[in-house]
Image (cartoon, rainbow, N blue to C red):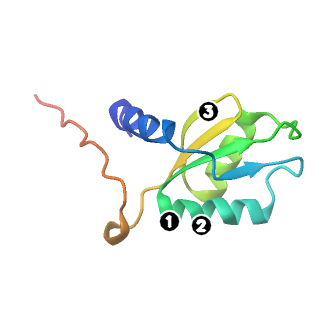
């Protein structure tokens, strides 16, 4: 993913509210499944970390990205943004094209 594509996704995420929240239980199988389903439906998901969760946001973000096969786009404070490209026929977000190297 290029920096331009990442910046584009960050700008889209800025307008969105967190639709999933991590609480004191941390990352449970149910939470992972919910994030996975949200990524399948939306491609771009913002996850909020509640005040009663004392886990490190960076560790939570990396773990969640690994378990959902998604890309970590951004961590700001207690907000995590994840992206997973949808299947070709169900793609919702069109990323800017990556420039080809010119010789």
Q: Identify which residue is drawn at 50% across, 36% down.
A: 14
SS under mark 1:
helix
| Residue drawn at (54%, 59%) of the image | 39
At label 1, counting other C-alpha atoms closer than 10 Å, the crowd grade (few under 14, some 14-19, many 20 or more) is some
Foreground residue, 98 or 54? Answer: 54
Residue lying farthest to the left in this orientation: 103
Q: CA distance from mark 2 to mark 3?
A: 20 Å
Reply above or below: 49 against 42.
above
- The residue at the point 68 percent across, 66 percent down is 33
Secondary structure beneath dot 3 equals strand
**Image quarter in which the N terminus is found:** top left
Q: Position of residue 12 (x, y in %)?
A: 43, 41
Residues at circles 2 and 1 in contact by the CB criterion of under 8 Å: yes
Q: Is residue 37 above or below residue 54?
A: below
Query: Image quarter for residue 11?
Result: top left
Q: Earlier in the sequence, mark 3 or mark 1?
A: 1
Quick check: 37 above or below 61?
below
- For disc 3, the neighbor class at 10 Å (few under 14, some 14 to 19, many from 20) is some
Q: Nearer the viewer, residue 28 or 92?
A: 92
Q: Viewed as shown, does residue 55 lie left or right of 34?
A: right
Q: Which numbered disc flags the more N-terminal residue, 2 or 3?
A: 2
Q: Quadrant of the C terminus?
A: top left
**What's the distance in space between the residues labelled 3 and 1, CA to CA?**
21 Å
Residue 21 as seen in the image, left or right of residue 23: left
Relative to 50, 89 lies left or right: left
SS category of the residue bearing label 2 = helix
User: Residue 102 location in percent, x, y?
Assistant: 12, 30
Residue 41: which numbered mark, if any? Answer: 1
Q: Position of residue 24 (x, y in %)?
A: 89, 47
Q: Are marks 2 and 3 in contact (CB under 8 Å)?
A: no
| Residue 75 badge | 3
Residue 37: numbered disc: 2
């Amino acid at each position: 993913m290029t920096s331009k594509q990442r910046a584009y996704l960050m700008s889209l995420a800025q307008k969105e509210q967190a639709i999933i929240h991590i609480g004191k239980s941390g990352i449970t199988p149910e939470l992972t499944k919910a994030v996975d389903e949200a990524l399948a439906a939306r491609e771009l998901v913002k996850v909020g970390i509640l005040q009663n969760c004392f886990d490190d946001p960076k560790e939570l973000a990396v773990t969640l990205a690994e378990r959902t096969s998604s890309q970590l786009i951004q961590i700001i404070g207690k907000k995590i943004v994840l992206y997973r490209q949808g299947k070709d026929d169900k793609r919702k977000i069109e990323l800017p094209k990556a420039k080809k190297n010119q010789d």
